[in-house]
Amino acid sequence: MNRIRLIFFPFAILYTIITSVRNSLFNLKFYKSKKFKIPLIGVGNLSTGGTGKTPMVEYIFKVFSKEFKLALLSRGFKRSTKGYVKANKDSNSSNIGDEPFQIFSKFKNIDVAVDENRVRGVLNLLKHSKNLQSIVLDDCFQHRSVSLKLNILLTTYESPYYKDFILPIGNLRELRAGYKRADVIIVTKCPKDLLEEEMKKTRKDVSLKSHQNLFFTSIKYNNFLLGESEININDLSDSKVLLVTGIANDKEIVNYLSYKNIQFDKISFSDHYKYSLKDIKKIELDFSDRIIITTEKDYQKIKLIDKKNKWYYLQMETYFLENEDLFKKIIIDTIIK
């Protein structure tokens, strides 16, 4: 725990009381969770971000959206609009949020909508989308106003929830005990060569309940930089490179570029950063001789801004280290049973 954060210990106690009372009121049925006939799949976390929710949501759509009619409902964090908005040909990262827009751009066979009120969002999706078989809700672990048929909790291998503390002395949105609500727990961003002994230790530390399943996933990057053109990343070993990120945790992409023996400078902005023309002009002026690389989420916002340089992004995806077939079965059973 960061010693500076200990100063905020009294606020952590207050935050604990508030979140615990709220969860207790839901547990005691004083607050009701709205149930829907359509199966809802939630993907969320206990921490404040950086667990890999978007790659996991994309995995679900990549594997299952050809077989089933699916939709995404997200809050649309930091969007310029309010209320319910369904994505269409005029949508962009500003009016529906960067992550929903990224998914909408990649998966043409699903419906994407945003609404800070999840109950209203589900009702509107059911009203405006035909023949839906399931809705995936992004970042909804604390949104208990809706009843999920499958609740997926993500936590990173490096910073698992059971070693973390509640805000503001840690990064947890609620007490660790909240993990008990999950049906599936996925340890994300694992080392690619994670040993079975380490998995066993993690299983013990997680302390699974009888209704829960545990999975381990890792991240991989496409070797081709995408954007206005395409470059093989292996051709950049002698190039001057600048990495620009505006995500919660850029350690994965930093490690990947280092693994590829690419020398680079880095500019980091806050998560969900809204880039301005002024930002882009300054970056391009200060680093005019660089090949500029960013994340896929950042590129969705940057590509709408006039640029002189060519900007590229690395596409990432999640994959299972074991028991992928069991996870697929759980998703299928959730949708059809």
Image (cartoon, rainbow, N blue to C red):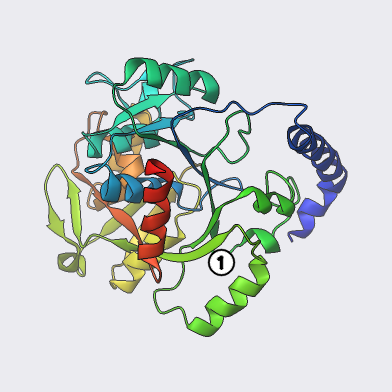
Q: Position of residue 314 (x, y in %)?
A: 27, 53
Q: Position of residue 117 (x, y in %)?
A: 55, 21
Query: Which element carries disc 1, helix, strand or loop?
Result: loop
Query: As drawn, which residue projects farthest toward the left?
Result: 229
**Image quarter hosting the N terminus:** bottom right
**Viewed as shown, does residue 303 lie left or right of 160?**
left
Identity of the residue drawn at 67% across and 53% down? 180
* Res. 70 image quadrant: top left
**Image quarter hosting the C terminus:** top left
* 332 or 85, nearer to the observer: 332
Total numbered circles: 1
Name the residue that disc number 1 marks: 158
The disc labelled 1 sits on which kind of residue? Glu
Classed neighbour count for the residue bearing mark 1: other residues with Cα under 10 Å, few (<14), some (14–19), many (≥20): few
Residue 317 at least partly seen: yes
Q: Position of residue 152 (x, y in %)?
A: 52, 49
* 7 or 116, nearer to the observer: 116
Q: Is residue 336 above or below residue 73?
A: below
Q: Is residue 153 above or below residue 210?
A: above
Identity of the residue drawn at 35% across and 48% down? 60
* 247 or 143, nearer to the observer: 143
Identity of the residue drawn at 33% across and 51% down? 59
